[in-house]
Amino acid sequence: MSAQSIETAIAHHQAGRLADAEAIYRRVLDDDPGQPDALHLLGVIAIQRGSASEAVDLISQALAVTPENALALNHLGEAYRMLNFFEDAAICFERSLKIKPDHFQAFNNLGNLCQAQGDVGSAIVAYQKALSINPGYAEAHVNLGNVYQQMGNWGQSIECYERALAIRPDFAEAAFNLGNVLKVMKRQEDAVPYYRKAIALKPGFAPAHLALARALQEIGDRDGAIAGFRRACELDPEDPEARWGLVMSELGLVEDSEQSVERYRSAFARGLDELDAWFKANPARDGFSAIGTQQPFYLAYHEQNNRELIVRFGALCGRLAKRWQDQQKLVVRTPKRGPRVRVGVVSAHLCDHSVWNAITKGWFKHLDQRKIELHAFSLGSIHDRETDFAKSRSARFIEGLATSRRWADAILAEPLDILIYPEIGMDPMTAKLACLRLAPVQATTWGHPETSGLPTMDYYLSAAAFEPDGAQDNYTEKLIALPGLGCCYEALEVANEPLDLRTLKVDLSIPMIVCPGTPFKYTATHDRLFVEVAQRLERCQFLFFKHPRGTLSAQLMHRLGAAFAKAGLNTLDYIVEVPWLSRAQFYSLLQQADLYMDTIGFSGFNSAMQAIECGLPVVTREGKFMRGRFASGILRELGLPELIAESNDDYIDLVVRLAGDSPLRSFLKHRIADSRRKLFDDANSIRDFEAFLGRAPD
């Protein structure tokens, strides 16, 4: 009778009817309290429900009766792993494999244990043993893919997930994880179908809804992202990351009309109030986990004073982070003043990146090591020659840590005088750490050119050439305007790589105007500038660059197409979408172009410096805020203020005049060639930066 009941219960169990199975197992135990199969399988149900302690108790009772049960030992090890009792789990898996050497599930679980302990090499070996026994074991393919993804071996990771889906087309987690690795590879558009597949297979899969929403937000599908976050909130009302994402996605990326900005800003402000109220009403929620998952990054592309909105956002982040820091008992020790100022630099971009090239490299190259002791915390996954250079100039160089707690411990390990974040806004871990107080003095700078709004940031390091009068009012931090460009920029001196523009469908017989900004730098308000330039020149070509996330460029081209059509013009006659180029190819294009048309409201720095290095005249309209004044600051330092327009109409006039006057452009190119050296390798601002570092800890 007991055996027949067990068989019936197992059928329910395998069909996912856990309540029915549990009821039968318990009836069996009422008749026979020591029945090992009922105890064991009831323990398996406890594991499935996340009750690891209950599982340990039940399965241990079963093993007291049948100590050589390899399956039960495997499940006991799984329960111990869930409780982080890693040594006990390892013993169970090893005993299980000794009894049953071909137990591929035990090898799989041993791999999970090794991965949880950070031993990825042993994890790979365990998963491969499981697959050598059973090549059709889809779960082991997924787990092996997870390890490869963790190691950055994305190609191998994708292969593992694809094998799992070939074996089990209904494996929602495999589709979800494949979407995740594609997203990490910046292939958001490719990730979306896999997230949708995971949701179709498992409609209540809240993490897949959350991941889909994030991917849609990053490819510019604002409405889709908002719907996705709302669904994730419905499925898991207690998830702070879903609520956080819903608010951040309100800002959108590429505007669809001139009215978009105010609509986006109003929705973001309302959402921020609701989010703040939710966290106040739910103080037990781990809000710190949500910080950095998404940032109000795109506020900076609105040419408005964002201080009030960012202060509200920063206050929320600061409150949530302080609660977490207090819970973790992370305390800043007062440093003893030594012969050198101990300066920490926290960045995900200590590599060949725009923030490194513009700002950080100059610090590592030119700061006097007799006065300044650099401690570098490299949060990013890229390690290249620039990373090696940063490491060679650091007293301490930390990389490869996985959690906020480990990074905070590493920063606090040796008391720093000052901690600097070259940018806050582009990297999730940077955003989290910046919300904490990890040094007595903390500062940020213009890697993301906007005030942080964080109560933990004391100083904002900017440049005199970029700041308007009364600029302090735009910042919550104390503004430090270093002289000139505020940085020591090194010319890239890119090797020449010939580029035949005709292969890109560029007409060499008419003025070529380079428009190098990313799609979200172009606001709908300024579409008319391109239309009016085209109307007045009659023949010209604007060279835009197709973003790797193609949907963003498609949205911009659609909007510009409507603006040109309204004026009776066809964008195909005036706009060429250039594919994303290598740096050498980009330099070749700049050397052949006629004019560089700067983005309005959020100016280019690196691209403008590169244009000057290539001798290309840059035209800009000076912005209201620092982020809109990079090119104008460069041009003033260069001695070419006549290339700076004061209004949009002046900007149109200037572009039209220069595009139509080849001798004038030639004259300007000679002037740029004669004076551009003053922009590069100027260490004067570094000396002032050094002086600030010496003062700030006091």
Image: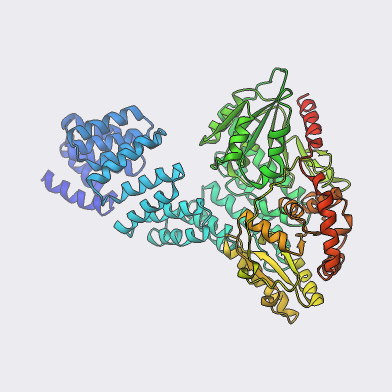
Q: Is residue 326 left or right of residue 128?
A: right
* Residue at 79% over, 39% down: 682
Outermost residue, bottom direction?
Answer: 568
Q: Is residue 319 left or right of residue 293?
A: right
Q: Is residue 505 visible?
A: yes
* Residue at 72% over, 37% down: 362
Quarter assignment of residue 121? top left
- Describe the colour scheme in one phrase: rainbow
Which of the two residues, 438 or 410, is positioned nearer the viewer here? 410
* Above or below for 240 versus 588: above
Residue 678: x and y in percent read: 82, 44
Which of the two residues, 484 or 443, is positioned nearer the viewer here? 484
- How many discs appear? 0
Quarter of the picture holding the C terminus: top right
Residue 330: x and y in percent read: 59, 27
Residue 527: x and y in percent read: 74, 69
* Above or below for 380 versus 207: above
Q: Is residue 522 visible?
A: no
Which of the two residues, 40 or 264, is positioned nearer the viewer here? 264
Q: Is residue 121 left or right of residue 565?
A: left
Residue 257: x and y in percent read: 70, 69
* Above or below for 178 versus 150: below
Quarter assignment of residue 204? bottom left
Q: Is residue 59 left or right of residue 687?
A: left
Outermost residue, left direction?
Answer: 1
